[in-house]
Image (spheres, rainbow, N blue to C red):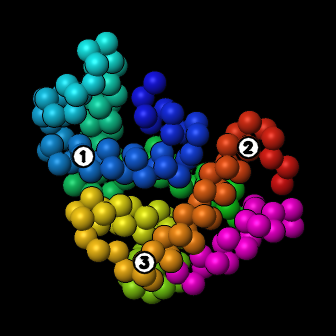
Amino acid sequence: MFISKQLKQQNIAEYLIYMWQVEDLIRAYGCDMERVRENLVSRFPVEQQAELAQWYEDLIEMMRREEVMQRGHLQINKNVITWLTDLHLQLLASSKFPYYNAAYYKALPFIVELRAKGANKEEPELETCFEALYGILLLKLQKKEIGEETRKAQEAITTMLFMLSTYYIEDKKGMLEL
């Protein structure tokens, strides 16, 4: 099973960050399927390569149609943010989820600070959270130092998104009573 399918079933937050990384990988290879095939698909077992190549081809075509070849996110990924935002707001409005509310209010000062530093104020708060975590991932991949305040923000946001991901899975299974 592909990593994306597995993550989508197990942790929607990790899935979204993974998909943003895939978008950036495709961009790094110039949205050129031959380069993607040579550098990414060829690393997988032969029996998986045809299906994986088709997946990348489909993503590249979507990126072209949606005009996100340079920047931005595919609609399928924006939909995840929308679904999670809807669930997030329902959880906050319900008195049945005090731990989620506590996690949110612990992360909120960091979210407010991030938005004050230039995040798009029109985007959902959760998108700001995902952008922060994705930015931290990119810094780690570049082996750059992560400051203590950034670590605290990462911890608070990660805790909240993990809880949200767990509730998302429960909701998809019909087990969440809001």
Question: Can you give x and y, in whole percent of width and height, for residue 86 in the image?
Answer: 66, 57
* Label located before the other in sequence (2 or 1): 1
Q: Name the amino acid, label 3.
A: Thr
Q: How crowded is the residue under tag 3: few (<14 C-alpha within 10 Å), some, or many (20+)?
A: some
Bounds of the magenta segment:
90-110
Disc 2 target residue: 170
Disc 3 from disc 1: Cα separation: 25 Å
The secondary element bearing badge 3 is classed as helix
User: Which residue is depicted at the point 50% across and 77% down?
Assistant: 152
Secondary structure that dominates the magenta span: helix
Determine whether, in the image, residue 76 is placed left or right of residue 105: left
User: Which residue is depicted at the point 74% across and 36% down?
Assistant: 173
Image label count? 3
Visible residue check, residue 95: yes
152 over 172 or under it: above or below: below
Question: Can you give x and y, in whole percent of width and height, for residue 145 in the image?
Answer: 29, 74
- Residue 63 included in the magenta stretch of the image: no
Q: Name the amino acid, label 2.
A: Glu
Q: Name the amino acid, label 1.
A: Leu
**Res. 134 image quadrant:** bottom left
Disc 2 from disc 1: Cα separation: 31 Å
Nearer the observer: mark 3 or 1; the answer is: 3
Disc 3 from disc 2: Cα separation: 30 Å
Disc 1 target residue: 25
User: Which residue is depicted at the point 18% across and 41% down?
Assistant: 31
21 over 31 or under it: above or below: below
Disc 3 target residue: 150
